[in-house]
Image: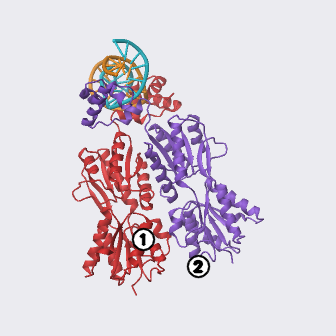
Chain colours: A red, B purple, C orange, D cyan
Amino acid sequence: MKITIYDVAEKAGVSISTVSKVLNNQQVGKKSKEKVLSAMNELKYKPSVLASALTGKRTSTIGFLLPDIANPFIAEMARQVEDRAHERGYNLVICSTDFRSEKEEHYVSLLRQKSVDGFIFAGGFKNRNVVMELLKENVPVILLAAEPHPNLTVNTVTVDNFVGGYEIANYLISQGHKNIAVIAEDATSSQERIRGYKQAMQDHNLYVQDEHIMICNSSVEHAQKLTEATLDTPNPPTAIIGANDLLAIGILIGAREKNLVIPQDLSITGFDNTLLSKCCDPTLTTVDQPIQSMCSQAVDILLAEIEGKHNTRQKILVLPKLIIRNSTCEVY
Amino acid sequence: MKITIYDVAEKAGVSISTVSKVLNNQQVGKKSKEKVLSAMNELKYKPSVLASALTGKRTSTIGFLLPDIANPFIAEMARQVEDRAHERGYNLVICSTDFRSEKEEHYVSLLRQKSVDGFIFAGGFKNRNVVMELLKENVPVILLAAEPHPNLTVNTVTVDNFVGGYEIANYLISQGHKNIAVIAEDATSSQERIRGYKQAMQDHNLYVQDEHIMICNSSVEHAQKLTEATLDTPNPPTAIIGANDLLAIGILIGAREKNLVIPQDLSITGFDNTLLSKCCDPTLTTVDQPIQSMCSQAVDILLAEIEGKHNTRQKILVLPKLIIRNSTCEVY
DNA sequence: CTGAAAGCGCTAACAT
DNA sequence: ATGTTAGCGCTTTCAG
């Protein structure tokens, strides 16, 4: 049978409340404490988190909602978040939402029934209402690498996507490109990236063709299709910006399919500086997000709120860094 | 305040046990049932999993131990496992162990305190004792894409790594390679892959140099280093087998660093058929594991045990498939 | 078919 | 400093 606090109390010859007190290290006489501790050891006692949580304590687990754990960028974040959370004694339950409103709603509801202590929405989300609901009920929440809708007063740690989009476009422009397309998925952070790109174009008096802003779902294949299509156009772009590395790979493959030499015939850029961007050939010019620091800050802020350390909400915007590799060059 | 079963009972004008009964859909009078149901709706009642689990029910969450969620192959599996588990009403709490014995032990102990219903060890593990302990205490466990030690009678779903290693080596040999090295991480499944490779070599009367079996940690960089080193050797291999795609990428980068042309100067193979193998250039010859079917089978077996449906343990060995791409060619 | 009551393992007043 | 006791929200006999 399972060992309970009663077994320990009995063995140690004290009451259960004394045992409970050493568990939560409150004031206990030195002798009692020793007896309890050794009883625990002998019995290999492990307190039940369920029972403890039922009386109002924390479960020390947090809900981690993300679009897709199979996405390399998300997976890298997950690892960082996990490590930081574990350091602080928390576990993560992961839920891939595919940017689907119903899934987000469903998972949040499920996890609340399981009494998770808080939620992290990483890499974007769709259903603003579920976040608002959480906020309204004072459930700790933080957005990580997910653009908050402007009227959402929620803790946020994200890279400045506008700046990222601006910088990458600006760099391409400095390389002589004038006809630049972008392929992005339908996520708020991509919108910001696109806005940055448009701003850069405008600042240089360059015209943005509507057809050159292409929205796709987050698959390599779709990006590839769009690339091939746009390359067949009468006046194809000389550079294509992928709103993330995965899409950039799709662009790369599409371009190769059309027998273009990268970067001479077409410059390509990614975003996120994932493993992929270092592995492909040519290596991708991309934008780095300081994942590790973002993730540990996000966890720390969330835990501060969970543990009632403070509760002034904050938005942290970290600056991205342009990483120039071999998928871009001056236009010929 | 939180809505409890008492609130529902009161509103419906019945006792809490009646409410409980409709919750677990047991025999309840039609009228009472209706009243309870509508009360639940009006109050937006959500039962507490904690309380229910405390009385002996399941938590519907399972512990998912894996070496590193940031590894693309693992992440792809995680997604499949997650989807299947969610379909069946279960959540996953993930723990990256880095093949570290203490971490495995620690996480298992922690998750047991949280009363998870069972464990999945995916992609390998180190500490045989923690698995044996679980088994001894009748905690549902399954190994997924993790080689069981022969004397571990545990549910297992894995690809036949021996065959995979054999096939890939055999293919290289058929291309005329005689001097074949392998870079693998220190995991049991890699050992099997290596065993397959050795067998193939032996079957063709080829000599295996000890220095050509290189063990590395699972980083691109380490694989790259080892590759460069072995390439500097007097009699370098004409082909290098990476025990997974990540390592193969490292090999690719190392070879490129040495100004070799792939595959003409050096054939390279991976294992797992991850996204990486399709994205790199040249695309990788690799071995495909039918991830989706493996993962859903694993979840199904685990849940069958959790839900007491049956309890004959089984090992399922699925066959790998050789995927020939552009990183290999006949030896010159 | 329905309800009263005991109990799951632990915490937190409140007494002692 | 330690023990007693009443819950936390739910399930489950056991009566009625």
Q: What type is the residue that disc 1 sits on?
A: Lys
Q: Which residue is mark 2?
A: B259
Q: Position of residue B309 (x, y in %)?
A: 53, 35
Q: What type is the residue that disc 2 sits on?
A: Asn
Kindly indicate whether the residue at mark 1 contacts the one at mark 2 (C-beta within 8 angstroms): no
- Observer able to see residue A186: yes
Q: Quadrant of the C terminus of chain B?
A: bottom right
Q: Is residue A123 left or right of residue B41?
A: right
Location of residue B268 by image quarter = bottom right
Q: Is residue A193 left or right of residue B90?
A: left
Q: Which residue is mark 1?
A: A225
Mark 2 to mark 1: distance in Å?
Answer: 33 Å
Q: Nearer the viewer, mark 2 or mark 1?
A: 1
Q: Residue at x 26, y 74 (%)?
A: A199
Q: Find the residue positioned furthest to the left.
A: A151
| Residue A53 vs residue A183, the one in the foreground | A183
- Observer able to see residue B191: no
Q: Position of residue B134 (x, y in %)?
A: 56, 38
Q: Residue at x 33, y 50 (%)?
A: A102
Q: Quadrant of the N terminus of chain B?
A: top left
Q: Position of residue A62 (x, y in %)?
A: 37, 46
Residue A18 vs A184, above or below: the answer is above
Q: Residues within 10 Å of mark 2 (few under 14, many from 20)?
A: few
Q: Secondary structure at mark 1?
A: helix
> Mark 2 falls within which chain?
B
Q: Secondary structure at mark 2?
A: loop
> Mark 1 falls within which chain?
A
Q: Position of residue B158 (x, y in %)?
A: 59, 50
